Image (spheres, helix red, strand yellow):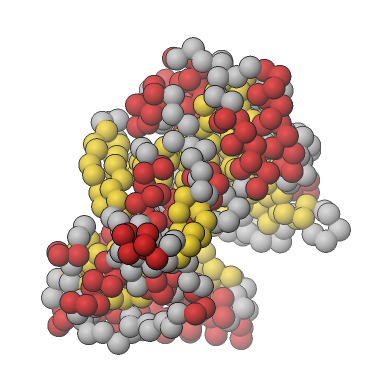
Amino acid sequence: MSLGEREQIAEIELLVKIIPERISSFVRSKNVTNLVEIVLDLGRLPVVRFVDGDELIEHLPVTEQEIAGIVAQLSEFGSDNRAGIPRTLHRISALRNRGGVIVGLTCRVGRSIGGSGKALSDLIKLGSSVLLLGAPGVGKTTMLRDIARTYADELSKRVVIVDTSNEIGGDGDIPHSGIGSARRMQVPKPQSQHEVMIEAVENHTPEVIVIDEIGSLAEAEAARTIAERGVTLIATAHGTHLINLMQNPTLSDLIGGIESVTLSDEEARRRNTQKTVLERRNSPTFESLVEINSFYEYAIHGDVALTVDKLLRGEDVRAELRRVDQTGVIESAQELVLDSALDPMPAEDIEISLESETLDSRNGAMQRLLPFGLSRGRLEKAIQVTKSNAIVVDSLTEADAIVTLRAYYRRRSGPLKAAENIGIPIYVLRNNTQHQIERQLLLITDTNPRTDDLANKALEETEEASTSIRMYGGGQVELSPQNSYIRRLQHELIERHGLKSASKGREPYKRVVVWS
């Protein structure tokens, strides 16, 4: 075991030891380095979440005394209902009843992983202001923490972290060693984050400001003010793709803002476009933007201004896709990003024709699918989970079909319009969830004739177990192991019965447990 692993286990132990013995002993019997969080809800069985799945601790539900015992060992909960353990990165979030009494806790493991910002080392050395986008749990804060340490310790910059929920520097007045020599300003309440951002610049002469989660108009305006003063900004924001910010009226200023412009007849003819177009209003607050797809995969837009301009003109743009393998080696490639221009016409004025459930599956042949406005990573994962006879391609010329979202299909520009003109099928999803993508894939490919049979048998088993529990009561029932797609269907059916469920075990033996 390496020194880093021993240090990580020692820090996780600081979280494990504050929870009841019956739960901590269970956690210690597992690989604690894979621990993600512990969920404790009053009157329910404890749930321990690991990287590879959830584990249910049977027999005894969580009691008021157990919750109170944990709360007594923590620092005071803030207005965001979060508390921590001093000098650690662990976060404990509270659920309260209408009277303000804590009735549930989410105890999330915080980790400091040195080198997690290595994939962005070139942007760091250039001193570019960088905005990180990503879904919860993909490692945004972990990367932010390592970037702050790199600037402070390796590049000898004056770094100030605006730490709203103490997630970057940890709980307590002495910050966690993971931020190196960077200074940390705590925020009294989330609503005042923008004020602390400005205070950091005015009072502490930073060269670099690090901020976790810019989410309001006031914070976006504060970020622009800081950037205009020549300070490098490193921040995260809500969203997974650059297009999310372009469509967000609150945060679009971070990438320059979008406005509708009416052109003269002559200019419209010269551009070969309609008279009303969308254009970028200002220079972006952030020069570069990174879409974090996972801990090991990043899509990098090195020139945000150029990228936004191309997207607004309906041109194809390329992002630099970087992957980090388990040995730390970084692989880089250019990947086509197929986001078309935003249409100034209101969406409600456009008719939608959803074709997704009417197209044939080409008799089970290999389907070459082009994602448009859809997460490539999710589509690839869905193909793997459903074992569909399909691959993901990068261009329209290679594609048998396009998979897109309803919002993009409404606009019918770029590759979608071209696809319709040449007769390439377009499959339209209502939302970008993993479940939706997996279900659509099964409809598109129809390459596994056993899928429906397996699903029907699994749902019959689920129905029988649910009916038995409702009629006769009793404890838990473990269902047969299934893949993730079928388990989702089982969870939905159990919920309709008014019962509770959780997944247990590891692949390929992961199964659903149902109880009342």
Q: Is residue 157 above or below residue 367?
A: above
x and y percent of residue 275 in the render? 42, 66
Residue 380: image x %, image y %? 28, 59
What residue is rendered at 36% in x and 47% in y? Answer: 307
Q: Nearer the viewer, residue 353 or 437?
A: 353
Residue found at the far right of this picture: 99
Eyeballing the image, is 506 above or below 474? above
The residue nearer to you, when weighing 387 against 134, is 134
Q: At which x and y percent is residue 195?
A: 73, 34
232, 74: nearer the viewer: 232
Let me know if residue 69 appears in the view: no
Q: Quadrant of the C terminus?
A: bottom right
How many discs appear?
Answer: 0
- Image quadrant assignment for residue 72: top right
State whether residue 204 appears in this view. yes
Q: Residue at x 25, y 49 (%)?
A: 335
- Residue at point 29% right, 79% down? 443
Q: 189 or 82: nearer the eye?
A: 189
The furthest residue to the top: 156
**The N terminus lies in quadrant:** top left
Residue 391 is situated, as x and y percent measured from the top left of the image, at: 20, 63
Q: Residue at x 72, y 54 (%)?
A: 95
The answer to whether 99 appears left or right of 124 in the picture is: right
Q: Is residue 313 above or below residue 4?
A: below
Q: Quadrant of residue 190?
A: top right
Q: Is residue 89 left or right of residue 342?
A: right
